Structures are given as C-alpha cells and as structure tokens.
Amino acid sequence: MSKPNPVDSEASVQESETLSRRVADDLHERIEQAAKVGEELEHGLHERGEQLTDKSRDLSTNLTQIVRDNPWAVVGGSVALGILIGVLTRRR
C-alpha cells in the first residue's frame, strides 16, 4: 500500500477551502437578495396599509355625514333592508 502524497492532500484541502468559500459567498449573496426583496415587500405592504387606513377613515367620515344629513332616509333604508333579508331567509 502506498503512502498518501502530502502535496496531493494539501492541494485537496485548498480546493475544499476554495469551494467552501465560493459556496459561502454564493449563499451570502442570495441571502442579501432575499433580504432586499423582503424589505421591498414590507415597504409596499406598509404603504398599502396606510392607504387603506386613510380610505376607511374617509368612508367612515362620509357615511357619518350622510347619516347626519338624512337620518330618516337611513332609517327607512335600514327597515327596507331588514324586511328584504327576512323575506329571503323565510323562502328557504
């Protein structure tokens, strides 16, 4: 049986280290890309959430104003809607 050549072993270790560095660098780059995409998504969702919050406040304000301006029309509409729901549910 022949002895392992120390030069071959050293070259193999260096190749393994080089490959490990390449893999680590590639993984690091991919993680940075994923983090960047995650930050962009977070920013977009936060922005969209603010838009929806503003829109719901506007709708609430508008609805409150309609009810204050036309209370009897709102009461009549509510009664009509209640009757319609009652009729539809009894048919089943």
Image (tube, rainbow, N blue to C red):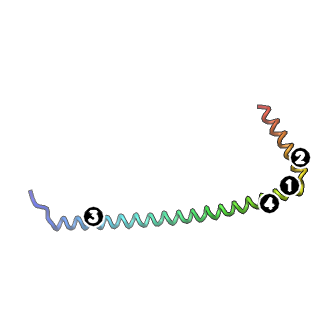
Residue matched to label 2: 76
Relative to 70, say whether 5 is above or below: below
Residue matched to label 1: 67
Badge 3: few (under 14), some or many (20 or more) residues near its Cα, within 10 Å?
A: few
The structure residue drawn at horizontal position 28% and vertical position 66%, both measured from the top left corner, is 17
Left or right: where does residue 12 sit relative to residue 43?
left
Residue 16 % position (x, y): 27, 64
Q: CA distance from mark 3 to mark 2?
A: 81 Å
The structure residue drawn at horizontal position 85% and vertical position 56%, both measured from the top left corner, is 66
Q: Tags 1 and 2 in contact by the CB under 8 Å rule? A: no
Name the residue furthest left: 1
Q: What kind of residue is marked 3?
A: Ser
Q: CA distance from mark 3 to mark 1?
A: 75 Å
Residue matched to label 4: 61
Residue matched to label 3: 16
Label located before the other in sequence (4 or 1):
4
Q: Secondary structure at mark 1?
A: helix
Label located before the other in sequence (1 or 2):
1
